[in-house]
Amino acid sequence: MKNLLWLILAPLLLLAGCRSAENNHLQPEDFASYLKRANLKVDNVRPVLPDPFRATSAVAILIDGSEIGVYKYDRNARVQADRIRRLEETGCTYINGVPYPVAVRGSFMLFGLDKSPRKKEILEVFNRFD
């Protein structure tokens, strides 16, 4: 009986501890579509190099004259998963030793959000991005 209970509870406990946004299947361009569906006016979406933040892919999205960077990390790759986890824990990334605030959800990091006049609305959409 004890073994049966363990077989039932073990998967539930594992899943409970891993509740992160399930958005690893999405791409940065998909976030632009989420923003449009939320009635935010997206002026431009352009690919950018993911290399500065060691991400797998990235886009810049222009909203109300302010550009944000959307960076994707592949959580199926251990190095990428560790990297996004660190970003989530610290809430910032560094450029030339200077910390910059970031928002993290699942496999994605938003950069430059602090300067956007639509920060609140963008974060609301980001918090549903999965």
Image (cartoon, rainbow, N blue to C red):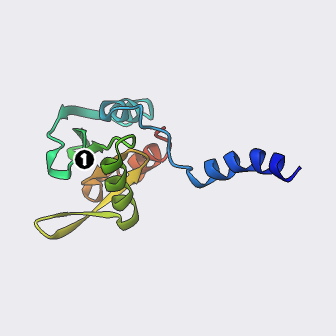
The picture places residue 14, in percent across and down from the top left corner, at: 62, 51
Q: Quadrant of residue 73?
A: top left
Q: Classify mark 1: residues with Cα within 10 Å, few (<14), some (14-19) or many (20+).
A: many
**Residue 76 placement, left or right of 96:** right
In the picture shown, does residue 72 fall above or below 123? above
Q: Residue at x 40, y 64 (%)?
A: 89
Q: Amino acid at mark 1?
A: Ile
**Residue 94 placement, left or right of 78:** left
Count of numbered badges drawn on the protein: 1
Residue closer to the observer: 87 or 66: 87
Q: Does the rendering let one see residue 109?
A: no
Residue closer to the observer: 67 or 99: 99
> To which residue does mark 1 refer?
68
Say what secondary structure mark 1 lies in: strand
Residue closer to the observer: 86 or 100: 86
Q: Residue at x 24, y 54 (%)?
A: 112
Q: Residue at x 14, y 40 (%)?
A: 49
Q: Residue furthest left?
A: 96
The picture places residue 72, in percent across and down from the top left corner, at: 31, 41
Q: Does the rendering let one see residue 1?
A: yes
The picture places residue 78, in percent across and down from the top left corner, at: 35, 48
Q: Quadrant of residue 114?
A: bottom left
The picture places residue 55, in percent across and down from the top left corner, at: 24, 45
